[in-house]
Amino acid sequence: MSDPSTSPMANAPFANERVLKRLRRRRAADRRFKWYGRMAIGFALAALTLLLGSIATQAVSAATYHVVTFDLSFDKNTFGDVQPDSPPPVDRVYGLVRDDLLAEFPETASSPALRHDLLGLVTRLAVLPVAKDLVRKPAEIGTKRRVELPLSDDLDLFLKGAAARHLTVPVGRVKAEEIAGNVTLTSEATFARLIAAASLENMQPPEMPGTGSILMTAGRSTIRLDSLAPSRVTGTLLTGTAQDFRTYPARARLIPAPESERTVSDLQIAWLLALKADGRVLRVPHWSLLTHTDSTQPELAGALAAIIGSLLTLLVTASLAIPVGILASIYLEEFAPRNRITGLIEVNINNLAAVPSIVFGLLGAAVFLGAFGLPRSAPVVGGLVLALLILPVVIIASRAALKAVPQSIRDAALAIGASRMQTVFHHVMPLAAPGMLTGAILGMARALGETAPLLLIGMVAFVAEVPRGPTDEATALPVLIYSWATQAERAWEPMTGAVILILLAFLIAMNGVVVFLRRKFERRW
Amino acid sequence: MDGTLGNSAAETGVLPDAPNASVRMSCRNINVFYGEKQAIFDVSLQIADRSVTALIGPSGCGKSTFLRCLNRMNDTIEGCRVEGEIMMEGKDINSPAIDPVLLRSRVGMVFQKPNPFPKSIYENIAYGPRIHGLAQGREDMDEIVEKSLRRAGLWEEVKDRLNLAGTSLSGGQQQRLCIARAIAVRPEVILMDEPCSALDPIATARIEELIDDLRKRYCIIIVTHSMQQAARVSQRTAFFHLGSLVEVGDTDQIFTSPRDRRTEDYITGRFG
Ligand SMILES: Nc1ncnc2c1ncn2[C@@H]1O[C@H](COP(=O)(O)OP(=O)(O)O)[C@@H](O)[C@H]1O
Ligand SMILES: [Mg+2]
């Protein structure tokens, strides 16, 4: 401006090259930062999707399972003495199941080992609900009833294709001859397709006895192939008759794993296929996962006891942690003088929030079980421990919610003569309530997911009964996940995934309640 | 003695410099400390009834602190200590026998930033009378609400939407709502701490009109940083400087012929 000869625009900031350059750099920095943020969110979302996706795909096969139907007649001679208070007649009901299976597959009559294999299809404990029903409703004695009993987990997994991987090759019509259990099948259409499939899987049954099996099924009959040639195969009859091969189209199942390395034998598969051909094997929704208690058999196990146990535990936790936490936070925030003692209390609350949860478990074991003599494995103890665990969290969240209420509201109330209590309860609390509730429910969600402290107070016990009250023996959902996840059998894997989803559903429901309450309270003003 | 302030409008005396005005509150040797730090030094001030007293002075000189002594709002501030005697109707309001809750229903307050409750307009007004049990039944309350809003000059604007949130009004309306809320508990004194500093000139003018109107019924003490405002609305003015009361007198006299050098410097804009 001092030099009138140059245009005033020349030095204006938006024309100056240095200024423009700096501006460009600043814009670039903005853009870069935006991308860092997007990348961070993308990474978090990807991790979450991966985690949830892997659990969900694992769990999806547990959504349904296979049952075998039985027509059982509870005749008066056998069950006449069953009273409403007698123990469930498990063995007698299972006797009916056993008789049915043995009659269905008479080839097992000669060998106890075969009988044992056959009875492996449906375990003895599977009839427990039926036996219990019978005790509850003795009117059923003397009647016939169709029951669905869960198929043993290994065979269930086989049918779902999750164990003993196998592939099916349709063969069609064949001619069959039988000489003493050895069946010879011939066909105009060659078995070339089957041979191709077998060699793809490196299976040559006659030459390599160490490899898997090829089963050929028609109707309710199955043979295991001993030789395989383009127009002629021979095999041993596992169950049924050669006649079926003349009547029904055949299909072959190639099971690459050798029998010794599988949990299901060729015979069991043959029986299963026979039952399936009879329409007695059904794939049904796995409701028992929600209605059964824990069991040693995966096909019978359910999470009901753990769900109830978790709810009872949370009930104890909520009824202690929420009122105590909220009252403590109101006192500390609104009434307590700021001095060294309250400062010390505040520091300690913050520190307590950072104490590892297992320490609370040790404390619970020492104090509640040891000193107070409360029952082991009981939701009341679990609830108390979890209440202590989340108390600092609830207090900190509630205090933050109270702090967020503007001082001017308190001044307004006090200045027209409201007492402190009226100020807090009429004006501050309603404004802080959504935040306090959020803190409380997030604390509860944390309690729902805690495992370590519950392990220490013995809530990891195997619980086959639904707990009726907070002092009954119980377990909780995360502990159930822990104990199922540490089982060796394959069948527990999808079950564990399913329980994780149940737990997640509870957590999502709780967060939904948070969102709903926030909306509801905030809509008022 | 029941420990409450008497209800009669008994006068406690007259002002030495204005013999025709009665005294509503009389402060003697007030010292206020925030922890170790002293904010008010030995202030003695008598406040006339049915008139507007303006407290002026540079920022941080203790006007708000002094104002808060008059309804014991300093009690709510951690570490604040008030010494001295504030007489109202023959009783010291700082004596333990006086319940601050009752005192505050007699000495209302309006703040710098409008702070209506986040409730309906109706509820904003009705809350005070309700906690003090001033209304018998719904009609009584409706009447109190209407009367208070009328006195605050807000009735015509909000009478059709009493259920609307008080926070949905404009800034000036919110401030008048706060005045109505203070009036609703039938105070005798209304303290106003820079009530117009967050408002635009038109809203300010309305509040000033209102203050002029309210003066007929109430004793009003207003803190203001605007000397024009003090000159416009007040009858008496007190000038504070660094926590001390420098000069008090008729507004006309303070603005035309201040006795103290510091007052003169301040009102002529030499500092502050
Ligand atoms: N809550 C408080 N705690 C500590 N000091 C305060 C507090 N409020 C005000 N003060 C101090 O007291 C003095 C007077 O403040 P204030 O009364 O707000 O002045 P004014 O209203 O005249 O601007 C100032 O020095 C201020 O820093
Ligand atoms: Mg101030």
Image (cartoon, rainbow, N blue to C red):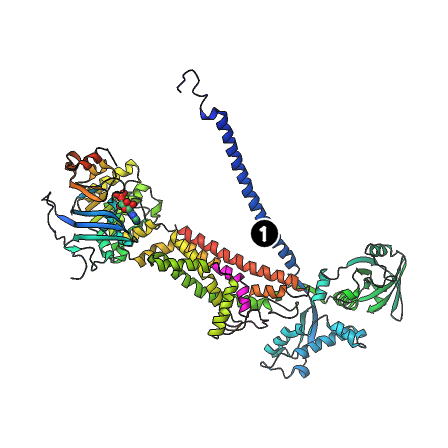
Where residue A451 sits, quadrant-wise, is: bottom right
Q: Quadrant of the N terminus of chain A?
A: top left
The one nearer the camera, A239 or A289, is A289
Looking at mark 1, is its residue's CB closer than 8 Å to ligand 1?
no
Q: What residue did someone put label 1 on?
A: A48
Residue A109: percent from left, percent from top: 80, 77
Q: Residue at x 23, y 33 (%)?
A: B270
In the rendered image, which quarter is residue B8 located in?
Answer: bottom left
Residue A387 in the magenta stretch? The answer is no
Magenta residues span A443-469
x 56%, y 61%: residue: A503
Decide if residue B155 is in sight here: no
Local secondary structure at mark 1 = helix
Question: As displayed, is residue A387 above or below residue B236?
Answer: below
Query: Crowding at label 1, few (<14), some or many (≥20) Cα neighbours within 10 Å?
Result: few
Q: Is residue A73 above or below residue B81?
A: below
Q: Amino acid at mark 1?
A: Leu
